[in-house]
Image (cartoon, grey):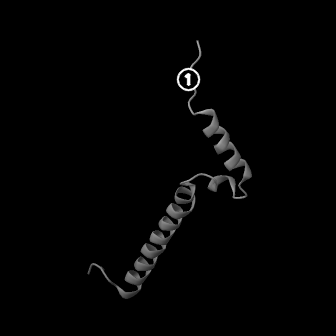
Amino acid sequence: MTEAPFLPRERLFKQQQYFQNLTKHTYLKGRYDVVTSVAIPLALAASSLFMIGRGVYNMSHGVGKKE
């Protein structure tokens, strides 16, 4: 009894050729890898820098200070 393959053989060969011939880094080879490896960390870094800057500004100008 043979089990049906998960992917058709032609599609698997096509994907293997695609990934083997790329010159990109390993973590950027997939279709959505740029989003998870580059865009999300950049967004987190930008938002954290914005919040740190806002906190420094508020502390230096006394905004939100309790009397």
Name the foreground residue: 25 vs 67: 25
Residue 62 placement (x, y as % from top left): 34, 85
Disc 1 crowd rating (10 Å Cα; few below 14, some 14-19, many 20+) is few
Quarter of the figure with the C terminus: bottom left
Residue 66 placement (x, y as % from top left): 27, 78
Name the foreground residue: 3 vs 56: 3
Q: Residue at x 53, y 54 (%)?
A: 32
Residue, far top: 1
Q: Residue at x 45, y 70 (%)?
A: 47
Q: Residue at x 59, y 51 (%)?
A: 30
Q: Is residue 15 left or right of residue 36?
A: right
Quarter of the figure with the N terminus: top right
The residue beneath circle 1 is 4
| Residue 39 in the image: above or below residue 29 | below
Q: Which residue is drawn at 37% across and 87% down?
A: 61
SS for callout 1:
loop
| Residue 44 in the image: above or below residue 65 | above
Figure quadrant of residue 52: bottom left
Name the foreground residue: 57 vs 21: 21
Residue, far left: 67
The amino acid type of the residue labelled 1 equals Ala
Residue, far front: 10
Q: In this view, does 12 lie to the left or right of 60?
A: right
Residue 64 placement (x, y as % from top left): 29, 79
| Residue 12 in the image: above or below residue 4 | below
| Residue 15 in the image: above or below residue 36 | above
Figure quadrant of residue 38: bottom right
